[in-house]
Amino acid sequence: MKSYMIRTKTAEQSRIVCREGVLRTALPRLLSEYREVFFFSDRTVWELYGRKVGRAYRESPVHIMPAGEAYKTPETLLKLLGAMAEAQLHRGACLVALGGGVVGDVGGLAAALYMRGIDCIQIPTTLLAQVDSSVGGKTAVDFAGVKNLIGAFRQPKVVLADPTFFATLPPREVRCGLGEIVKHGALSAPIFETLWENRDRLTDGDFLAAIVPENIAFKAEIVRQDADEKGLRKCLNLGHTTAHAFELSDGKLSHGEYVLAGIIFEAELAKKYAGGDAAYLDDLQTLCRAALGGMPQLPPAREAARLALLDKKNVAKDEIVVTAPVRKGEYALLSLNYETYVTELERIQQSLAQAE
Ligand code: NAD
Ligand code: GLY
Protein backbone atom coordinates (compact mmCIF):
# COMPACT_ATOMS: atom_id res chain seq x y z
CA MET A 1 0.00 0.00 0.00
CA LYS A 2 1.22 3.51 -0.83
CA SER A 3 0.25 6.05 1.78
CA TYR A 4 1.28 9.71 2.02
CA MET A 5 0.63 12.30 4.65
CA ILE A 6 0.61 15.98 3.74
CA ARG A 7 1.25 18.08 6.81
CA THR A 8 0.87 21.70 5.77
CA LYS A 9 2.18 24.64 7.77
CA THR A 10 -1.38 25.29 8.96
CA ALA A 11 -3.04 22.76 11.26
CA GLU A 12 -4.52 20.91 8.29
CA GLN A 13 -3.42 17.39 7.46
CA SER A 14 -4.32 15.18 4.59
CA ARG A 15 -3.74 11.46 4.14
CA ILE A 16 -3.57 9.94 0.68
CA VAL A 17 -3.84 6.19 0.26
CA CYS A 18 -3.24 4.69 -3.15
CA ARG A 19 -3.88 0.99 -3.81
CA GLU A 20 -6.09 -1.32 -5.82
CA GLY A 21 -9.10 -2.29 -3.70
CA VAL A 22 -8.50 0.51 -1.17
CA LEU A 23 -12.19 1.41 -1.07
CA ARG A 24 -13.21 -2.06 0.06
CA THR A 25 -10.76 -2.07 2.93
CA ALA A 26 -10.26 1.52 4.04
CA LEU A 27 -13.58 3.26 3.39
CA PRO A 28 -15.78 1.32 5.85
CA ARG A 29 -13.26 1.87 8.63
CA LEU A 30 -12.93 5.57 7.86
CA LEU A 31 -16.65 6.18 7.63
CA SER A 32 -17.35 4.28 10.84
CA GLU A 33 -15.83 7.29 12.62
CA TYR A 34 -18.68 9.55 11.44
CA ARG A 35 -22.28 9.62 12.59
CA GLU A 36 -23.30 11.37 9.38
CA VAL A 37 -21.97 10.62 5.90
CA PHE A 38 -23.10 12.42 2.74
CA PHE A 39 -22.21 11.21 -0.78
CA PHE A 40 -21.66 13.54 -3.73
CA SER A 41 -20.99 12.39 -7.29
CA ASP A 42 -21.86 13.06 -10.93
CA ARG A 43 -24.43 11.10 -12.89
CA THR A 44 -21.93 9.16 -15.03
CA VAL A 45 -19.76 8.09 -12.12
CA TRP A 46 -22.67 7.30 -9.82
CA GLU A 47 -24.25 5.07 -12.48
CA LEU A 48 -20.96 3.22 -12.89
CA TYR A 49 -19.83 3.01 -9.27
CA GLY A 50 -22.40 4.47 -6.89
CA ARG A 51 -24.10 1.23 -5.96
CA LYS A 52 -20.77 -0.48 -5.37
CA VAL A 53 -19.20 2.27 -3.28
CA GLY A 54 -22.34 3.29 -1.45
CA ARG A 55 -23.63 -0.27 -0.82
CA ALA A 56 -22.77 -0.24 2.84
CA TYR A 57 -24.25 3.23 3.33
CA ARG A 58 -27.74 2.91 1.88
CA GLU A 59 -29.12 5.10 4.62
CA SER A 60 -26.74 7.95 3.77
CA PRO A 61 -28.03 10.83 1.65
CA VAL A 62 -26.65 11.23 -1.88
CA HIS A 63 -26.57 14.26 -4.15
CA ILE A 64 -25.77 13.85 -7.84
CA MET A 65 -24.72 16.61 -10.25
CA PRO A 66 -24.75 16.40 -14.06
CA ALA A 67 -21.32 15.41 -15.43
CA GLY A 68 -18.94 17.94 -16.95
CA GLU A 69 -17.10 21.24 -16.55
CA ALA A 70 -20.19 23.16 -17.76
CA TYR A 71 -21.79 22.32 -14.40
CA LYS A 72 -18.86 23.42 -12.22
CA THR A 73 -20.90 26.47 -11.26
CA PRO A 74 -22.15 28.37 -8.19
CA GLU A 75 -25.64 26.97 -8.99
CA THR A 76 -24.38 23.39 -8.65
CA LEU A 77 -22.54 24.34 -5.46
CA LEU A 78 -25.66 25.94 -3.96
CA LYS A 79 -27.81 22.92 -4.89
CA LEU A 80 -25.31 20.69 -3.12
CA LEU A 81 -25.22 22.93 -0.04
CA GLY A 82 -29.03 22.96 -0.09
CA ALA A 83 -29.12 19.15 -0.13
CA MET A 84 -26.63 19.04 2.75
CA ALA A 85 -28.79 21.45 4.76
CA GLU A 86 -31.90 19.44 3.95
CA ALA A 87 -30.14 16.33 5.23
CA GLN A 88 -29.52 18.33 8.44
CA LEU A 89 -25.82 17.54 8.49
CA HIS A 90 -23.95 18.69 11.56
CA ARG A 91 -20.39 19.96 11.78
CA GLY A 92 -19.11 16.47 12.59
CA ALA A 93 -20.38 15.08 9.26
CA CYS A 94 -18.24 13.87 6.38
CA LEU A 95 -18.79 14.57 2.69
CA VAL A 96 -17.54 11.86 0.33
CA ALA A 97 -16.77 13.23 -3.16
CA LEU A 98 -16.75 10.36 -5.66
CA GLY A 99 -15.75 11.43 -9.16
CA GLY A 100 -13.32 13.35 -11.35
CA GLY A 101 -11.83 16.77 -10.76
CA VAL A 102 -15.15 18.56 -11.21
CA VAL A 103 -16.89 16.61 -8.45
CA GLY A 104 -13.78 16.89 -6.28
CA ASP A 105 -13.49 20.66 -6.70
CA VAL A 106 -17.22 21.35 -6.13
CA GLY A 107 -17.53 18.83 -3.29
CA GLY A 108 -14.35 20.09 -1.64
CA LEU A 109 -15.64 23.67 -1.75
CA ALA A 110 -19.03 22.67 -0.31
CA ALA A 111 -17.25 20.84 2.52
CA ALA A 112 -15.10 23.92 3.13
CA LEU A 113 -18.16 26.20 3.32
CA TYR A 114 -20.82 24.14 5.09
CA MET A 115 -20.88 25.28 8.75
CA ARG A 116 -17.45 26.83 8.06
CA GLY A 117 -16.01 23.45 7.25
CA ILE A 118 -16.74 19.74 7.59
CA ASP A 119 -14.50 16.79 6.74
CA CYS A 120 -14.18 15.68 3.14
CA ILE A 121 -13.00 12.34 1.81
CA GLN A 122 -12.01 12.45 -1.84
CA ILE A 123 -12.39 9.34 -4.00
CA PRO A 124 -10.92 10.45 -7.35
CA THR A 125 -12.11 8.36 -10.31
CA THR A 126 -10.18 9.89 -13.23
CA LEU A 127 -6.45 9.73 -13.88
CA LEU A 128 -6.24 13.54 -13.64
CA ALA A 129 -8.10 13.59 -10.35
CA GLN A 130 -5.83 10.92 -8.83
CA VAL A 131 -2.50 12.47 -9.80
CA ASP A 132 -3.48 16.11 -9.53
CA SER A 133 -6.81 17.63 -8.50
CA SER A 134 -7.56 15.51 -5.41
CA VAL A 135 -4.10 16.26 -4.00
CA GLY A 136 -3.43 19.62 -2.44
CA GLY A 137 -6.69 21.12 -1.23
CA LYS A 138 -7.56 23.49 -4.07
CA THR A 139 -11.35 23.64 -4.37
CA ALA A 140 -13.40 25.88 -6.66
CA VAL A 141 -16.25 26.58 -9.04
CA ASP A 142 -16.11 28.61 -12.26
CA PHE A 143 -17.77 32.03 -12.26
CA ALA A 144 -18.25 35.03 -14.60
CA GLY A 145 -16.54 33.14 -17.42
CA VAL A 146 -13.39 32.58 -15.34
CA LYS A 147 -12.25 29.10 -14.34
CA ASN A 148 -12.00 28.46 -10.60
CA LEU A 149 -12.80 32.09 -9.71
CA ILE A 150 -14.62 31.19 -6.48
CA GLY A 151 -12.72 28.77 -4.29
CA ALA A 152 -10.84 27.98 -1.15
CA PHE A 153 -7.78 26.09 -0.01
CA ARG A 154 -8.89 23.26 2.26
CA GLN A 155 -7.14 19.92 2.51
CA PRO A 156 -9.31 16.80 2.27
CA LYS A 157 -9.14 14.61 5.36
CA VAL A 158 -8.32 11.56 3.26
CA VAL A 159 -7.88 10.75 -0.44
CA LEU A 160 -8.47 7.15 -1.54
CA ALA A 161 -6.98 6.51 -4.99
CA ASP A 162 -7.83 3.18 -6.63
CA PRO A 163 -6.58 2.44 -10.18
CA THR A 164 -9.55 0.10 -10.73
CA PHE A 165 -11.54 3.17 -11.82
CA PHE A 166 -9.37 3.59 -14.94
CA ALA A 167 -10.96 0.52 -16.56
CA THR A 168 -13.98 2.59 -17.64
CA LEU A 169 -12.20 5.85 -18.53
CA PRO A 170 -12.62 7.00 -22.14
CA PRO A 171 -9.24 7.38 -24.00
CA ARG A 172 -9.61 11.17 -24.06
CA GLU A 173 -9.79 11.24 -20.24
CA VAL A 174 -6.66 9.10 -20.08
CA ARG A 175 -4.83 11.61 -22.30
CA CYS A 176 -6.17 14.37 -20.10
CA GLY A 177 -4.50 12.83 -17.03
CA LEU A 178 -1.32 12.16 -19.01
CA GLY A 179 -1.02 15.90 -19.60
CA GLU A 180 -0.45 16.53 -15.90
CA ILE A 181 1.73 13.41 -15.56
CA VAL A 182 4.05 14.56 -18.37
CA LYS A 183 4.08 18.00 -16.70
CA HIS A 184 5.30 16.29 -13.52
CA GLY A 185 7.90 14.54 -15.70
CA ALA A 186 9.11 17.94 -16.92
CA LEU A 187 9.63 18.97 -13.28
CA SER A 188 11.07 15.72 -11.92
CA ALA A 189 13.93 13.80 -13.53
CA PRO A 190 12.93 10.36 -12.10
CA ILE A 191 9.35 10.73 -13.41
CA PHE A 192 10.71 11.81 -16.79
CA GLU A 193 12.93 8.69 -16.94
CA THR A 194 9.99 6.41 -16.15
CA LEU A 195 7.83 8.03 -18.82
CA TRP A 196 10.60 8.06 -21.42
CA GLU A 197 11.36 4.36 -20.90
CA ASN A 198 7.68 3.54 -21.29
CA ARG A 199 6.79 6.02 -24.03
CA ASP A 200 5.32 3.30 -26.25
CA ARG A 201 2.81 2.18 -23.58
CA LEU A 202 1.74 5.40 -21.91
CA THR A 203 -1.95 4.51 -22.09
CA ASP A 204 -1.55 0.91 -20.91
CA GLY A 205 -3.71 0.30 -17.82
CA ASP A 206 -0.98 -1.50 -15.84
CA PHE A 207 1.51 1.24 -16.59
CA LEU A 208 -0.95 3.95 -15.51
CA ALA A 209 -1.68 2.13 -12.26
CA ALA A 210 2.06 1.84 -11.63
CA ILE A 211 2.88 5.53 -12.16
CA VAL A 212 0.06 7.04 -10.10
CA PRO A 213 1.78 6.64 -6.68
CA GLU A 214 5.00 8.34 -7.86
CA ASN A 215 2.97 11.23 -9.26
CA ILE A 216 0.89 11.60 -6.10
CA ALA A 217 4.07 11.59 -4.01
CA PHE A 218 5.64 14.25 -6.23
CA LYS A 219 2.67 16.60 -6.01
CA ALA A 220 2.14 15.89 -2.29
CA GLU A 221 5.73 16.95 -1.57
CA ILE A 222 5.28 20.24 -3.41
CA VAL A 223 2.02 20.90 -1.53
CA ARG A 224 3.67 20.00 1.76
CA GLN A 225 6.27 22.71 1.14
CA ASP A 226 3.93 25.36 -0.25
CA ALA A 227 0.25 24.54 0.32
CA ASP A 228 -1.08 28.04 -0.36
CA GLU A 229 0.97 28.63 -3.52
CA LYS A 230 3.25 31.42 -2.37
CA GLY A 231 6.21 30.19 -4.42
CA LEU A 232 7.26 26.63 -5.25
CA ARG A 233 3.75 25.37 -6.05
CA LYS A 234 3.66 27.80 -9.00
CA CYS A 235 5.97 25.38 -10.84
CA LEU A 236 2.85 23.27 -11.41
CA ASN A 237 1.82 25.89 -13.98
CA LEU A 238 4.46 24.54 -16.37
CA GLY A 239 3.11 24.54 -19.93
CA HIS A 240 -0.15 26.04 -18.71
CA THR A 241 0.13 29.65 -20.02
CA THR A 242 0.07 28.52 -23.64
CA ALA A 243 -2.26 25.61 -22.80
CA HIS A 244 -4.87 27.98 -21.31
CA ALA A 245 -4.52 30.34 -24.28
CA PHE A 246 -5.34 27.54 -26.77
CA GLU A 247 -8.00 26.12 -24.44
CA LEU A 248 -9.80 29.46 -24.11
CA SER A 249 -9.51 29.98 -27.86
CA ASP A 250 -11.41 26.87 -28.97
CA GLY A 251 -11.99 24.41 -26.11
CA LYS A 252 -12.29 21.37 -28.40
CA LEU A 253 -9.69 19.21 -26.65
CA SER A 254 -9.42 18.15 -23.02
CA HIS A 255 -7.44 20.32 -20.59
CA GLY A 256 -4.61 17.76 -20.42
CA GLU A 257 -4.31 17.65 -24.21
CA TYR A 258 -3.85 21.44 -24.22
CA VAL A 259 -1.24 21.06 -21.46
CA LEU A 260 0.69 18.60 -23.64
CA ALA A 261 0.50 21.02 -26.58
CA GLY A 262 1.46 23.91 -24.26
CA ILE A 263 4.57 22.02 -23.13
CA ILE A 264 5.57 21.41 -26.77
CA PHE A 265 5.33 25.16 -27.53
CA GLU A 266 6.98 26.33 -24.31
CA ALA A 267 9.85 23.84 -24.72
CA GLU A 268 10.52 25.49 -28.07
CA LEU A 269 10.50 28.94 -26.42
CA ALA A 270 12.93 27.64 -23.79
CA LYS A 271 15.38 26.46 -26.49
CA LYS A 272 15.59 29.99 -27.85
CA TYR A 273 15.09 32.24 -24.82
CA ALA A 274 16.09 30.28 -21.71
CA GLY A 275 19.25 28.46 -22.82
CA GLY A 276 17.32 25.18 -22.66
CA ASP A 277 18.97 21.81 -23.31
CA ALA A 278 17.79 21.22 -26.88
CA ALA A 279 18.36 17.44 -26.93
CA TYR A 280 16.39 16.94 -23.70
CA LEU A 281 13.63 19.32 -24.83
CA ASP A 282 13.33 17.39 -28.12
CA ASP A 283 12.77 14.23 -26.06
CA LEU A 284 10.20 15.98 -23.87
CA GLN A 285 8.35 17.10 -27.00
CA THR A 286 8.46 13.53 -28.35
CA LEU A 287 6.95 12.36 -25.05
CA CYS A 288 4.15 14.93 -25.34
CA ARG A 289 3.37 13.76 -28.89
CA ALA A 290 3.33 10.13 -27.71
CA ALA A 291 0.88 11.04 -24.93
CA LEU A 292 -1.28 12.96 -27.41
CA GLY A 293 -1.20 10.15 -29.96
CA GLY A 294 -0.03 12.70 -32.59
CA MET A 295 -0.21 16.47 -32.87
CA PRO A 296 -3.84 17.66 -32.62
CA GLN A 297 -5.37 20.51 -34.63
CA LEU A 298 -4.95 23.75 -32.68
CA PRO A 299 -6.61 27.13 -33.27
CA PRO A 300 -4.56 29.92 -34.93
CA ALA A 301 -1.69 30.92 -32.61
CA ARG A 302 -2.23 34.68 -33.01
CA GLU A 303 -5.80 34.47 -31.68
CA ALA A 304 -4.76 32.19 -28.83
CA ALA A 305 -1.79 34.36 -27.83
CA ARG A 306 -4.12 37.30 -27.20
CA LEU A 307 -5.83 35.22 -24.52
CA ALA A 308 -2.50 34.56 -22.80
CA LEU A 309 -2.57 38.24 -21.80
CA LEU A 310 -5.29 37.30 -19.30
CA ASP A 311 -3.01 34.84 -17.51
CA LYS A 312 -2.72 35.38 -13.74
CA LYS A 313 1.06 34.81 -13.80
CA ASN A 314 1.76 37.91 -15.92
CA VAL A 315 3.34 40.72 -13.97
CA ALA A 316 2.99 43.60 -16.45
CA LYS A 317 0.71 44.64 -19.30
CA ASP A 318 2.06 43.40 -22.68
CA GLU A 319 4.30 40.83 -21.00
CA ILE A 320 3.69 37.09 -20.96
CA VAL A 321 5.20 34.88 -18.28
CA VAL A 322 5.57 31.17 -18.96
CA THR A 323 6.82 28.42 -16.64
CA ALA A 324 8.99 26.65 -19.18
CA PRO A 325 10.92 23.36 -19.03
CA VAL A 326 14.67 23.98 -19.56
CA ARG A 327 16.69 20.96 -18.50
CA LYS A 328 15.82 17.55 -17.05
CA GLY A 329 13.99 18.25 -13.77
CA GLU A 330 14.46 22.02 -14.16
CA TYR A 331 12.16 24.84 -15.13
CA ALA A 332 12.46 28.61 -15.50
CA LEU A 333 10.08 31.53 -15.38
CA LEU A 334 10.40 33.10 -18.80
CA SER A 335 9.08 36.59 -19.41
CA LEU A 336 8.43 37.59 -23.02
CA ASN A 337 7.19 40.78 -24.56
CA TYR A 338 3.72 40.13 -26.06
CA GLU A 339 4.74 40.75 -29.70
CA THR A 340 7.67 38.35 -29.35
CA TYR A 341 5.35 35.73 -27.80
CA VAL A 342 2.85 36.06 -30.69
CA THR A 343 5.56 35.89 -33.36
CA GLU A 344 7.15 32.86 -31.72
CA LEU A 345 3.86 31.00 -31.27
CA GLU A 346 3.07 31.52 -34.96
CA ARG A 347 6.56 30.38 -35.98
CA ILE A 348 6.33 27.26 -33.80
CA GLN A 349 2.85 26.44 -35.11
CA GLN A 350 4.08 26.68 -38.71
CA SER A 351 7.13 24.52 -38.09
CA LEU A 352 5.00 21.91 -36.31
CA ALA A 353 2.58 21.85 -39.27
CA GLN A 354 5.49 21.36 -41.71
CA ALA A 355 6.88 18.53 -39.60
CA GLU A 356 3.55 16.61 -39.67
P1 NAD B 1 -14.32 15.53 -14.88
O1 NAD B 1 -14.51 15.50 -13.43
O2 NAD B 1 -15.26 16.36 -15.68
O3 NAD B 1 -14.38 14.03 -15.41
C1 NAD B 1 -14.29 13.82 -16.81
C2 NAD B 1 -15.44 12.93 -17.31
O4 NAD B 1 -15.16 11.58 -16.95
C3 NAD B 1 -16.80 13.26 -16.69
O5 NAD B 1 -17.77 13.13 -17.69
C4 NAD B 1 -16.98 12.17 -15.63
O6 NAD B 1 -18.34 11.88 -15.40
C5 NAD B 1 -16.27 11.00 -16.27
N1 NAD B 1 -15.69 10.03 -15.37
C6 NAD B 1 -15.11 10.24 -14.17
N2 NAD B 1 -14.61 9.10 -13.69
C7 NAD B 1 -14.89 8.14 -14.59
C8 NAD B 1 -14.61 6.76 -14.66
N3 NAD B 1 -13.88 6.13 -13.74
N4 NAD B 1 -15.05 6.07 -15.74
C9 NAD B 1 -15.76 6.70 -16.73
N5 NAD B 1 -16.03 8.01 -16.72
C10 NAD B 1 -15.60 8.72 -15.67
O7 NAD B 1 -12.85 15.99 -15.31
P2 NAD B 1 -11.39 15.73 -14.71
O8 NAD B 1 -10.50 15.75 -15.88
O9 NAD B 1 -11.36 14.59 -13.77
O10 NAD B 1 -11.15 17.05 -13.86
C11 NAD B 1 -11.10 18.31 -14.48
C12 NAD B 1 -11.38 19.35 -13.43
O11 NAD B 1 -10.36 19.30 -12.44
C13 NAD B 1 -11.37 20.77 -13.97
O12 NAD B 1 -12.51 21.45 -13.50
C14 NAD B 1 -10.11 21.38 -13.39
O13 NAD B 1 -10.23 22.77 -13.15
C15 NAD B 1 -9.97 20.63 -12.11
N6 NAD B 1 -8.61 20.59 -11.60
C16 NAD B 1 -8.43 20.91 -10.29
C17 NAD B 1 -7.18 20.86 -9.74
C18 NAD B 1 -6.99 21.16 -8.29
O14 NAD B 1 -5.85 21.27 -7.84
N7 NAD B 1 -8.07 21.25 -7.53
C19 NAD B 1 -6.07 20.46 -10.52
C20 NAD B 1 -6.28 20.12 -11.85
C21 NAD B 1 -7.57 20.18 -12.37
N1 GLY C 1 -2.96 21.86 -10.29
C1 GLY C 1 -2.08 22.84 -9.78
C2 GLY C 1 -2.04 22.90 -8.30
O1 GLY C 1 -2.67 22.13 -7.62
O2 GLY C 1 -1.39 23.76 -7.77
Image: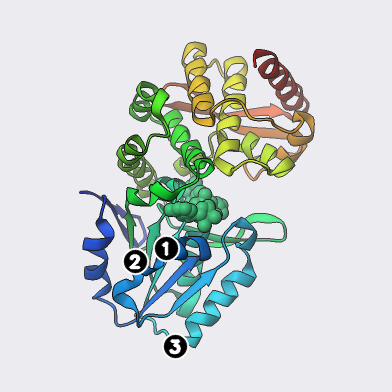
Looking at the rendered structure, the kind of residue marked 2 is: Val
The crowding category of the residue bearing disc 2, from other C-alpha atoms within 10 Å (few below 14, some 14 to 19, many at least 20), is some
Q: Where is residue 87 in the image (x, y as percent from the top left)?
A: 45, 86
In the structure shown, which secondary structural element does the residue marked by tag 1 occupy?
strand
Name the quadrant of the C terminus.
top right
Which quadrant of the figure has residue 89?
A: bottom left
Instruction: Select label 1 or label 3 by which is in front.
Output: 1
In the picture shown, does residue 151 fall above or below 292?
Answer: below
| Residue in front for this viewpoint, 82 or 344 | 82
Q: Which residue type carries mark 1?
A: Leu
Badge 1 is on which residue? Answer: 98
The residue that appears at 50% across and 41% down in the rendered structure is 171
**In this picture, residue 242 sits left or right of residue 5:** right
Q: In the rendered structure, which disc, 1 or 2, sits on the residue that comes first in sequence?
A: 2
Give the residue at mark 3. 88
Regarding mark 3 in the picture, which secondary structure is present there? loop
**What residue does disc 2 label?**
53
Residue 229 visible somewhere in the drawing? no
Answer whether labels 1 and 2 touch (C-beta < 8 Å): yes
Q: Is residue 322 visible?
A: yes
- Name the residue located 35 percent from the left edge and 44 percent from the top edge: 216
Q: Residue at x 53, y 35 (%)?
A: 238
Q: How far apart are marks 3 and 2 (CA)?
A: 22 Å
Q: Which amino acid does label 3 sit on?
A: Gln
> Is 119 left or right of 295, judged from the image as shown?
left
